[in-house]
Image: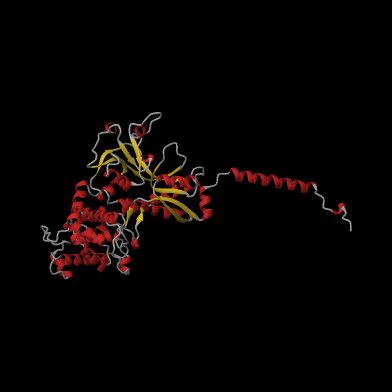
């Protein structure tokens, strides 16, 4: 049968208009998709994954995490940010700022973190919220350099080490960069702070640039590290974002951090990681390092043995013992406390310790006494505050610690946070306050110093012995301790 052309459906005017409109819409959509800059937040939510390049710094590690976790300050923040936007966190650990920025430019990650400084003005990466304000210092190795009054006093040809060109303060940049001529000083880049300190110790560079937190941490294990000059200008640790995207992910990061700061989460997190770093000066650093060499090796097996028996981190037990006796088993105080853990006679008798000068008996008794204090504290006190308050009780007595908690609560503070209670303990030495309490007068500043010192010494030992070998059975009590391995 022959096909009749008049039987074919003909395109009406309306049909042609519809087809033309569709073609225009499709073309416009394709053009928009070609030129449109995608939303950084939408990209992360589409993947359901927040991809982060995290620069790892050995000085940023702490073992004060529950359930045995070494952690990083910014890593805790990043986990919270990922939860805030409804994505899972995917980390790519990198060795330095250069690699982090390379991943940003290729858009293989959504942001970069890890004590990063805002890049120079000519960088194309986007700068996100400030995480921490920091100071920068010009530092040197004691045998290989010296203090200077200003950068103008640095001789020509000085070799300056830094973790990136962005780490250089404004006053040093003209000295290591020059257009059309040789700069008066040489800049040498290193992957991280420890690598830079090693280069200074070997004389590969004359000076280095470190942040205040890097200097506080690294000086604990490198006693010959010195500050040559506090550099001018304010610097900030920031998060960095890929170039060419909108502000949506950056705005979300700002909102997340603003919410943390509006509450107390950020303050508590900062205190947990860094609140003990400024406790000791250079003299304390040198003394501690000397006694680590002279005394610790003798008692380290005992610390391990007793810590293993009680589910504690031996470094924690060693930190308490150093604060008490400087690791001297014959130590005696004017009030009659004695031994490695400086037990009173009454406390020793209650614990069944026959000889307070016997190192094993003293350590075992002291460990049990700390755990007793922890068990007697109210259940609503959680870690790490529970451990800090147990240590304060070890020093000043549980009754005085409970008095300080009551004063804190009456004053509108949180009696379950060490950061609040430590501000009320010194008031126990003032009549207007201690007369309101059950147990009366106490030299309340002493337990505050005591706890902060132990936190600092413990952090020191974590830096010196980052991989202890004792792994006791993980009892419920063990898992509740922030200083357990």
Q: Quadrant of the N terminus?
A: bottom right
Q: Where is residue 231? Give x, y as percent.
A: 30, 37
Residue 32 in the figure: left or right of residue 317? right
Q: On the rendered image, what quadrant is the C terminus found in?
A: bottom left
Residue 263 horizontal/vertical position (percent): 38, 52
| On screen, residue 274 above or below 142 | below
- Which residue: 74% across, 48% down? 19
403 displayed left or right of 99: left
Q: Residue at x 84, y 53 (%)?
A: 8
Residue closest to the eye, 380 or 290 = 290
Residue 133 in view here: yes
How many numbered discs, if any? Answer: 0
**Residue lying farthest to the bottom in this orientation:** 352
336 versus 56 height, above or below = below
Q: Position of residue 286 (x, y in %)?
A: 20, 49
> Residue at image x 17%, y 67%?
361
Q: Quadrant of residue 36?
A: top right
Query: Compared to 373, does 431 lie above or below?
Result: above
């Amino acid at each position: 049968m022959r096909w009749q052309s008049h039987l074919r459906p003909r395109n009406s005017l309306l049909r042609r208009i519809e087809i033309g409109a569709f073609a225009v819409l499709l073309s416009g959509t394709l053009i928009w998709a070609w030129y449109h800059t995608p939303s950084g937040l939408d990209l992360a939510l589409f993947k359901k994954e927040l991809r982060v390049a995290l620069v790892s710094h050995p000085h940023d590690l702490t073992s004060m995490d529950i359930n045995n976790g070494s952690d990083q300050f910014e890593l805790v923040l990043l986990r919270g940010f990922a939860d805030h936007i409804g994505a899972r966190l995917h980390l790519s650990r990198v060795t330095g700022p250069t690699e982090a920025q390379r991943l940003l430019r290729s858009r293989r990650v959504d942001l970069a973190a890890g004590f990063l400084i805002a890049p120079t003005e000519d960088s194309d990466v986007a700068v996100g919220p400030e995480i921490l304000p920091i100071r920068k210092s010009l530092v040197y190795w004691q045998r290989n350099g010296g203090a200077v009054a200003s950068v103008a006093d640095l001789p020509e040809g000085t070799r300056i080490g830094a973790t990136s060109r962005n780490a250089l303060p404004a006053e040093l940049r003209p000295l290591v960069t020059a257009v059309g001529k040789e700069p008066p000083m040489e800049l040498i880049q290193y992957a991280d702070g420890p690598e830079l300190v090693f280069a200074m110790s070997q004389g590969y560079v004359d000076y280095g640039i470190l942040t205040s937190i890097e200097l506080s941490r690294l000086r604990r294990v490198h006693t010959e590290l010195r500050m040559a000059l506090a550099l001018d200008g304010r610097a900030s640790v920031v998060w960095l974002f890929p170039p060419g995207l909108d502000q949506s992910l950056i705005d979300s990061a700002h909102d997340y951090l603003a919410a943390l700061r509006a509450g107390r989460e950020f303050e508590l997190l900062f205190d947990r990681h860094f609140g003990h770093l400024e406790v000791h000066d250079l003299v304390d650093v040198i003394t501690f390092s000397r006694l680590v060499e002279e005394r610790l090796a003798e008692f380290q097996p005992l610390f391990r043995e007793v810590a293993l028996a009680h589910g504690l981190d031996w470094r924690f037990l060693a930190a308490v013992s150093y604060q008490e006796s400087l690791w001297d088993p014959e130590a005696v105080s004017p009030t009659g406390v004695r031994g490695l853990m400086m037990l009173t006679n009454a406390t020793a008798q209650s614990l069944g310790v026959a000889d307070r000068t016997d190192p094993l008996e003293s350590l075992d008794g002291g460990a049990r006494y700390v755990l007793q204090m922890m068990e007697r504290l109210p259940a609503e006190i959680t870690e790490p505050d529970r451990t800090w308050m147990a240590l304060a009780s070890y020093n000043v007595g549980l009754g005085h610690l409970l008095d300080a908690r009551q004063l804190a609560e009456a004053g509108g503070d949180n009696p379950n946070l060490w950061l609040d209670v430590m501000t009320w303990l010194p008031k126990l030495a003032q009549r207007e306050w201690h007369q309101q309490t059950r147990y009366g007068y106490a030299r309340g500043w002493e337990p505050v110093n005591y706890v902060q010192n132990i936190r600092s010494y413990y952090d020191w030992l974590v830096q010196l012995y980052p991989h202890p070998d004792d792994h006791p059975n993980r009892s419920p009590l063990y898992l509740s301790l922030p200083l357990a391995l």
